[in-house]
Amino acid sequence: MSHPAAQTAIKVLLVDDDEDDAVITQALLAQSSDSHFEIEWACSYEAGLTRLKEHRHDIGLLDYNLGSRSGLDFLQEAQTDQGHAPIIMLTGEGNETLVLKALESGAIDYLPKRNISSQNLQLAISHAIEKIRLQAELTAYQGQLERTNRELQQRNDEIQRFYDLVVHELKTPLATASEFVNLLLEGHAGTLSAEQTDYVHLIHGSCGHLNRNINDLHEVARLKTEKLNLDIDSEVLPSVIFDALRALNPQAQAKGIFLQTSLAPDLPNVMMDVQRVRLILLHLVGNALKYTEPTGTILVTADEDSLCPGRIRIAIADTGIGIAQDQLAGIFERLYQVEKDPSGLSRGLGLGLFVSRELVKLHNGTMSVTSTLGKGSTFSFTLPCA
């Protein structure tokens, strides 16, 4: 153990108008073998306040009885001075009411004089100083956290403005390009050769891909600014499922993938926004098509949820490449990209699953996924029955 003289001294302000008690307290501190104390004695209420406001001490020891004033008065007056040393109340009048009043008035601890000893006085001082240190660290951490939150909010706002700008600047020229591509395919500029038709179809597909990405950006911007309103009504679910699959069937046929359905008979109507649920299905089945090899199968099922009565569960199961277990937790996050995508395909913007999950939430439903790498994935979501 190091010699006390080699230790950093703990500076103590003792406020006590009773000289005998002050001498005893100083003697108890002098007996410490673990800490070295430098004690300054203030023999009156006024002297104690003056010394406290000089901010030269690590800890204050305050007697309850200070002539015509009390330690509680001292504590209340000290609260007007920020950053003063923590104060431990010392008194011969120990009772629970006084303890509570002392702590409420700003004391960090309370010691009855009848039980005071060198050991418990030293422990109280050490604990008080450590508590103040931890509180200061916590305050600094909270301040840093608030600054970080403000920076994150600022960056989020910048992303939202970027989404708005991209949607506004790209949607109109893309719509124009798509319209002229349709005119070419319809023969309004003359008959196209087979090779030209193939090229124009490629352009048409690229325009559609861009349009979906822009629509996703638009949906995200509206979701984050709470400007997306759903038109929810009692609707027939199978017709929405079949409509989405018809839109994707040419893509499935081109890859030689089998689109299948297994819908429970007599499904009740579902409370939903038809266009939003169709978008969810297009995202989920479209992803399944993207990551399923030729001759694979995609099965869309719908049945009443056995775990949650009053809800319909729609599931899209594929025989595709699957998703690694360590990637599953993040795939629904905005802009998330699966690492080391084995498909070698374009990853897109990483917004489709995020948008789908948020739309399901707006329907008061839930979305989940199970997957085995190399064997396929199953995405499912629930919607409330009408």
Image: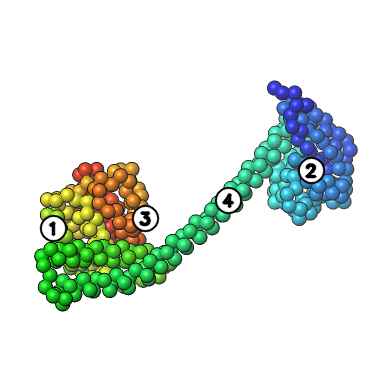
**Element under disc 4:** helix
Quadrant location of the C terminus?
bottom left
Q: Which badge, 3 or 2, comes first in the chain's sequence?
A: 2
Check whether the beta carbons of the residues at disc 2 and disc 1 lie within 8 A of each other. Answer: no
Q: Residue furthest top?
A: 1
Check disc 2: other Cα within 10 Å, few if <14, some if 14-19, many if 20+: few
Give the spatial CA distance, label 3 vs label 4: 26 Å
Question: Which numbered disc, 3 or 4, marks the residue closer to the eye?
Answer: 3
The picture quadrant where one finds residue 380 is bottom left
**Residue 68 location (% of width, % of height):** 87, 51
Q: Which badge, 3 or 4, comes first in the chain's sequence?
A: 4
Question: Can residue 80 be spotted in the picture?
Answer: yes
Instruction: Establish if 178 lies above or below 118.
Output: below
Depth check, front residue: 9 or 353? 353
Q: Residue flagged by tag 2: what amino acid is it? A: Arg
**Residue 99 location (% of width, % of height):** 71, 46
Q: Residue beneath label 3, please?
A: 335
User: Residue at coordinates 70% horizontally, 22% vertically from top-left?
Assistant: 1
Check whether the beta carbons of the residues at disc 3 and disc 1 lie within 8 A of each other. Answer: no
User: Residue at coordinates 35% horizontally, 48% vertically from top-left?
Assistant: 329
Q: Residue beneath label 2, please?
A: 56
Q: Residue furthest bottom?
A: 188
Question: Which numbered disc, 1 or 4, marks the residue closer to the eye?
Answer: 1
Check whether the beta carbons of the residues at disc 3 and disc 4 lie within 8 A of each other. Answer: no
Q: Residue flagged by tag 1: what amino acid is it? A: Ala
Give the spatial CA distance, label 3 vs label 1: 28 Å
Question: Which numbered disc, 3 or 2, marks the residue closer to the eye?
Answer: 3
Q: Residue beneath label 1, please?
A: 254
